[in-house]
Image (spheres, rainbow, N blue to C red):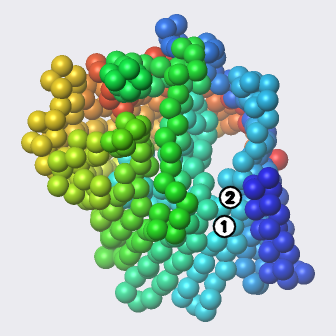
């Protein structure tokens, strides 16, 4: 009901602000997505990973006073319970307008993104949908929508961007329904703790924990800012964020249930042409406000993260990139002293290497894409592969796979090692 009210309110604003001669554009697509699990031991309720039909309708109105844009998804989920099979979501519904020559506003439900990395996010701490990402939905679904006010100011110095989100929006993580995940030791109700294990819906009603999100108060609003300037051939940017970690990385000391700790982020990036390709650098300092001294074992330590990347075309219609990220934990000696040596825990510096390979063939109607994440010290890997065939301007066929591997069950990709899946989808654009 709240979504319907919100959508109708935005439509009413569209009518009020748009002149009679505003142009209205509509389009969208219908898509069938079907996937299967490759691991028999996965504790999810079905050996299918996804079975859904999706209708997306986009609408845009452009007039002298401003612009309205909406993107609404309607989904039939063949794997959900009967009462949950039909769902819909407003992914975008915003008004965009300009005051004077230097000030732009965008208000409403929108997708927020910035930073330089390819699927590595340091200063982009806006909400992500990893459930969609791991199941084979289109790449656009990696970014989760959120309600926000975005303001951009331009002058001779550079471009200033400000984002205000009145309520916290968390990452969408595996819940055990279609994707199993690692559940860390939890209170067993008898004064002890359960063993950490991979869990899913097949294990009954106790597989799932739903962390309480920060209260919807003004003090818990999210605020982000960016300054961007062109320096010669390079784009230079500085970032700031005040809010919360997007994953439930902390524990409430009283209830021993997961929570979202407070976070402030300070970062910078540089991107431009170099060595016949595109080169980028990005770094950020994660200031854990609930553990400033690194001595609270229930909260994440502050950390410093940096990344370097390069992309170029190395052959006809073949583009390759390579990225390396290093994440250094602050006050690591205090963290290490709090760990149980019988369990795996991270190194002081965690390394992640990624590479994307994209090949266009058959008059660019076929695209073959592969992307690999590999952490040498976490001993884990995630491989994404897809082949896309553009049958016509309207119809696209895709086949792909997601493969996970890891030595330890409590690492980012190691916990997903039972979720290997293949999928196929057909999209009709109208």
Indicate the quadrant where residue 425 lies: top right
**Residue at x 37% of width, y 36% of height:** 256
N-terminal of the two: label 1 or label 2?
Answer: 2
The extreme bottom residue here reads 100
Mark 2, residue position:
92
Task: Say whether marks 1 and 2 touch (CB < 8 Å).
Answer: yes
Q: Secondary structure at mark 1?
A: strand
**Residue 286 in view (yes/no):** no
From what the image shows, is residue 185 above or below residue 22?
above
Q: CA distance from mark 1 to mark 2?
A: 8 Å
Residue sitting nearer the eye, 192 or 19: 192
Residue 272 falls left or right of residue 159: left
Image location of residue 183, percent across then percent down: 41, 26
The extreme right residue here reads 20
Badge 2: few (under 14), some or many (20 or more) residues near its Cα, within 10 Å? many
Point out the frontmost of discs 1 and 2: 1
Image location of residue 136, percent across then percent down: 58, 31
Mark 1, residue position:
108
Image location of residue 212, percent across then percent down: 50, 45
């Amino acid at each position: 009901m709240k979504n319907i009210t919100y959508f109708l309110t935005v439509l009413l604003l569209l009518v009020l602000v748009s002149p009679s001669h505003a142009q209205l554009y509509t389009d969208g697509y219908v898509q069938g997505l079907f996937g299967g699990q490759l691991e028999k031991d996965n504790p999810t309720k079905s050996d299918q990973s996804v079975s859904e039909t999706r209708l997306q309708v986009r609408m845009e109105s452009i007039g002298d006073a401003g612009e309205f844009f909406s993107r609404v998804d309607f989904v039939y989920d063949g794997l959900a319970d009967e009462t949950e099979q039909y769902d819909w979501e407003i992914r975008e519904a915003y008004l965009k307008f300009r005051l004077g020559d230097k000030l732009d506003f965008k208000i409403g439900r929108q997708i927020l993104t910035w930073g330089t990395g390819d699927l590595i996010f340091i200063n982009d701490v806006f909400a992500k949908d990893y459930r969609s990402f791991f199941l084979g939905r289109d790449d656009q679904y990696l970014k989760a929508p959120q309600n926000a006010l975005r303001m951009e100011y331009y002058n001779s110095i550079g471009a200033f961007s400000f984002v205000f989100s009145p309520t916290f929006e968390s990452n969408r993580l595996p819940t055990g329904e279609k994707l199993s995940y690692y559940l860390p030791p939890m209170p067993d109700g008898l004064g002890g703790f359960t063993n950490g294990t991979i869990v899913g819906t097949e294990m009954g009603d106790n597989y799932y924990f739903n962390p309480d999100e920060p209260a919807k108060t003004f003090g818990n609003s999210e605020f982000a800012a960016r300054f961007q300037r062109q320096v010669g051939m390079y784009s230079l940017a500085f970032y700031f964020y005040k809010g919360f970690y997007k994953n439930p990385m902390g524990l409430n000391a009283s209830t021993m249930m997961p929570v979202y700790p407070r976070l402030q982020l300070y970062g910078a990036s540089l991107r431009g042409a170099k060595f016949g390709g595109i080169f980028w650098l990005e770094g950020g300092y994660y200031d854990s406000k609930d553990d400033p001294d690194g001595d609270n074992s229930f909260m994440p330590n502050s950390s410093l993260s940096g990344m370097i990347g390069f992309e170029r075309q190395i052959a006809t219609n073949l583009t390759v990139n390579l990225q390396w990220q290093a994440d250094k934990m602050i006050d690591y000696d205090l963290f290490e002293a709090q760990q149980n040596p019988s369990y795996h825990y991270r190194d002081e510096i965690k390394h992640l290497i990624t590479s994307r390979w994209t090949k266009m063939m058959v008059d660019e109607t076929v695209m073959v894409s592969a992307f690999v994440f590999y952490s040498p010290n976490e001993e884990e890997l995630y491989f994404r592969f897809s082949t896309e065939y553009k049958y016509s301007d309207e119809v696209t066929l895709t086949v792909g796979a997601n493969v996970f591997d890891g030595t330890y069950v409590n690492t980012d990709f190691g916990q997903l090692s039972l979720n290997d899946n293949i999928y196929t989808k057909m999209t009709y654009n109208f």
